[in-house]
């Protein structure tokens, strides 16, 4: 919009040009799909080449919707009341998908405090608990019946 100072005159050519420009941009070219806007005209894309992936003798595991990729795998073995690796702290980042797999030589129950998750541990058979580490803090992971502390999980 132009503001005219008192006593000045806008040349007729300038006023006509401004009016024409306003009318042209106000017209609904975008309303009619058959009228192409010059800024959105298709351009030729460079040619692309597609190659097939190389064959592999061994399949590569991949994550699917039912089995998302785990960010942190923690594996613990219990034999004769001895925890391997030795009890300590394991740190994970908030938001990571964590899987804890435990194999015990006696039947027991795995428990992740603070997340209130658990799993039965049949003797000699690995059992897993998988969860998203959304709560920050220090959480004890233990067995219930033998009362063994497996590790402390630190979520930051």
Image (cartoon, rainbow, N blue to C red):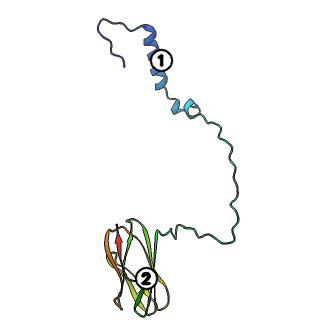
Per the model, the C-alpha gap separating discs 2 and 1 is 80 Å
The circle drawn on residue 118 is none
In percent of width and height, residue 72 lies at 45, 71
Quarter of the view holding residue 95 = bottom left
- Residue 37 appears in the rendering: no
In what element is the residue under mark 1? helix
Q: Residue at x 38, y 9 (%)?
A: 10
Q: Name the front one of labels 2 and 1.
A: 2
Q: Residue at x 40, y 92 (%)?
A: 81
Instruction: Residue at the far left: name it.
Output: 6
The circle drawn on residue 85 is 2
In percent of width and height, residue 42 lies at 61, 36
Q: Which residue is mark 1?
A: 20
Q: Quick one: label 1, few (<14), some, or many (20+) residues within 10 Å?
A: few
Please tell me which residue lies in front, 11 or 141: 141
Quarter of the view holding residue 90 = bottom left
In the displayed structure image, the side of residue 139 where residue 13 appears, left or right: right
Q: Is residue 14 above or below residue 1?
A: above
Please tell me which residue lies in front, 142 or 9: 142
Please tell me which residue lies in front, 104 or 13: 104
């Amino acid at each position: 919009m132009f503001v005219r100072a008192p006593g000045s005159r806008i040349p007729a050519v300038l006023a006509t040009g401004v009016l024409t420009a306003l009318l042209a941009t106000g017209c609904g070219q975008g309303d009619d799909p058959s009228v192409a806007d010059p800024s959105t005209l298709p351009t030729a894309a460079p040619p692309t080449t597609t190659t097939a992936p190389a064959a592999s003798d061994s399949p590569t595991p991949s994550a699917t919707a039912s089995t998302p990729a785990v960010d942190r795998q923690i594996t613990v073995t219990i034999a004769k009341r001895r925890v391997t690796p030795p009890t300590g702290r394991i740190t994970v980042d908030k938001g990571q998908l964590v899987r804890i797999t435990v194999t015990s030589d006696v039947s027991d129950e795995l428990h992740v405090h603070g997340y209130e998750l658990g799993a039965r541990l049949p003797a000699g058979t690995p059992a897993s608990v998988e969860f998203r580490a959304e709560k920050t803090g220090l959480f004890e992971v233990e067995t219930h019946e033998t009362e063994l502390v497996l590790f402390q999980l630190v979520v930051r």
